[in-house]
Image (cartoon, rainbow, N blue to C red):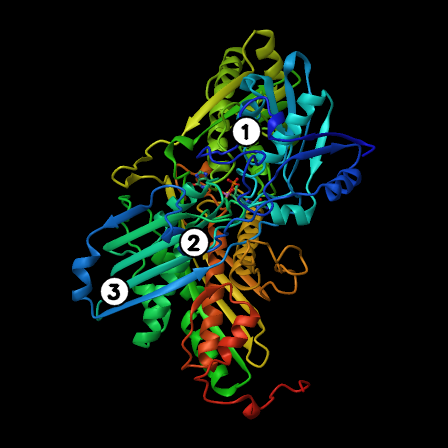
Amino acid sequence: MDGIEAIFLHSDIPGANQIGGIVPDEPLFAEDELHFRGQPIGLIVGKSELLCRLAREKIELQYDELPVITDPREAAQKGHLIVPPRTFEMGNPDQIWSECAYVFEGKADVNGQEHLYIESQGAYAWPKEDGCIFVASSTQGPTAVQKTVALVLDIPMHKVEVNVQRLGGGFGGKEDQATAWAVMVALAAFSLGRPVKFSMHRMDDMLMTGKRHPYSSDYKIGLSKDLKILAYEATHYQNAGAAADLSPAVLERTLFHSTNAYFVPNVRATALSCKTNLPPNTAFRGFGGPQGKFIIECAIAHAAEKIDVSPDTIQRKNLLSEGDIMSYGQKMEGVLATPTWEECEKLYGIEEMKTEIADFNQSSFRFKKGLAVQPICFGISFTNTMMNHARALVHVYHDGSVVVSTGAVEMGQGVNTKLLQVACETFGISPDRVKIESTNTLRIANTSPTAASAGADLNGKALQMACNCVLDRLKKVAEDALGTDNISIRDNKIFSGDKETPMSWNELVQLAFSKRVSLSEHAHYATPIIHYDKSKEKGHPFAYHVYGTAVICVTVDCLKGTYHFDSVKLVHDGGKSMNLPVDNGQIEGGLVQGIGWMTMEELLYDKKGRLMSNALSTYKVPDIYSVPKEILIAHFDSDGHELAIKKSKAVGEPPLMYGLGAYFAIRNAVKAFNPAANLEFNAPYTPEKVLMDLCKKQVSTTFQDIQVEDAGIS
Ligand code: MTE
Ligand code: HPA
Ligand code: MOS
């Protein structure tokens, strides 16, 4: 077609046709077989996006259909696993079941989630001299892009410059899956000798990219007479999709978080990464942790229902305590599971809320309220120990202005604001003097992706080290010049002890420059303490844990199956937050994203692996009308942790898991209406599913009997 410049297929790749990050099992362009609908076959390059789309319509594919597997259990049965299964064990559940007063077994399913970053996937590239290439990418992992471009083009990494200005959201969806598109434009730009840009249409993005992993799990839980959980067993079938992507790492975090904020002395958790014919599923805020937590919360809800106590009675009795050992061997320190729960009780009155809800439900037939308490405990560090490092480069220019580069990628989470604070507070200068630069592989090499909520900690610590090195040299210059010691810098001024000296920051920098003192530093930080032995599945993988407790209240309209959240009241352990507005933004955003996953966001593939919920008309996400009417956030007063940047604990992912409580709050409301119904565990709890559960057979009243109490409703 006129205006079409080239079409690239696998045969046009100079290097390896391979983009797999953990396992080399993912071609950039399909060669013989397609393993999922939406798998890229080639790239059409033309003068405009429209022309390329029209050209795509003209291409006809001929293919033979192969059997399609979309169900992870079916894949496991056929032996289609991405990696061998893994098991975390502590104590011996087999010996304990007979000692338990109660033992319950069941199955729980939890669906995936579309990332729906506002900026869809995309990249642009242009050739530079000497066979080099520049790639601007919307990625959380610039080094992964650099490495893969080099591999596919068969050039060394030093010829590939990847630059990331900022992302319009990533949520894990651009930790690994931004790579393909960046590599494609690099390939085209490299081959054509011209700039090439690609920006994904929303529906293509939804169709072609992987999402949060759906899980189907079996659980078994054993409790003592006084409701202590004595044993827990879980088998998780992770729906990995058609290639490994990050699934093995996600699987690992499911195991790490399979007992959430609870101490269980006898645990056996097994996880299987099942290869299906869906797009490869990938990182999503919480990274497998939320699925692991959901399953044990289902087991607890199941037990509570059968024993006839409220789930929070069991939750409360089994919270982690100081010094408890997790199934993966880490001894827990600074445990705030019970303190945040108690603070929640004190601030918001959980018991009073429960009484109010019971009273309401007594007098209301059509509308029922439900409450759930949701404690969280989330480990901070990449579960893969070798990824926990970062670097920072600081230049102080001789006019006193400062430029900072790190490996951190800004994606709306506010990491650049925190880095700015680190630089300003370490130097004692105002923010107008500091610029946080884009993330660039020429300035900062070998970065880990900005992920695992560890971006601010790792890069912030490296930055602190770099700033301190320059600061020490500057202080030495000031001491020599002023003939005093005990130099400090505040508000762009130099102090000797408490006394302001006549010297300003700018003057000190100029003086140091004239004395040929280095005004630049590159520093490397690697998290101390952490280690993990995969052969034993034991170690100390996390620098620290983040805790918190949320109370979620919902009102269900039992005629319609619809619901709204009255309130979420939570106590969050953010340590010594260095920026409350930023952290509160993360808490609110994470919470609502978690509620969306548990309630209205329903990912649907048909039996042939075709995405049915492929647009925002069929895939519903929370909007301003569906967020809780009231969100109260209290910060637990604690010392934070030495390994957190300025003792301000990581906040990116943990709050998403407060959203789990949404599922159980709705469930409790449904139970209040239809106590005899035998309810499954199958998230999300969409209004359709709620309605079906409200109408389940055992319901004692028929719809004819419903009295419409609300004035104005007919
Ligand atoms: N917040 C916004 N606004 N946009 C995002 O894409 N990603 C989340 C979280 N908060 C995200 C976000 C995810 S998945 C992670 S791992 C962390 O931010 C990453 O940033 P951090 O390490 O600086 O916390
Ligand atoms: N969290 C998030 N992303 C990751 C991790 C992790 O633990 N490991 C590898 N990528
Ligand atoms: Mo976040 S899922 O670790 O990018």
Mark 3 neighbour density, 10 Å: few (under 14) some (14–19) many (20 or more): many
Question: Which residue sits at x=60%, y=66%?
Answer: 629
Please name the residue that numbered disc 1 is placed on: 17
Mark 3 vs mark 1: in front: 1
Q: Position of residue 45 (x, y in %)?
A: 73, 32
Residue, far right = 2
Q: Amino acid at mark 3?
A: Gly
Whether the residues at callouts 3 and 2 have beta carbons within 8 Å, the answer is no
- Cα distance between the residues tagged 1 and 2: 27 Å
Please state the total of marks drawn on the protein image: 3
Mark 2 neighbour density, 10 Å: few (under 14) some (14–19) many (20 or more): many
Mark 3 vs mark 2: in front: 2
Q: Earlier in the sequence, mark 1 or mark 2?
A: 1
Question: Which residue sits at x=46%, y=22%?
Answer: 486
Question: Element at badge 2?
Answer: helix
Question: Which residue sits at x=48%, y=33%?
Answer: 21
Q: Amino acid at mark 1?
A: Asn
Please name the residue that numbered disc 3 is placed on: 222
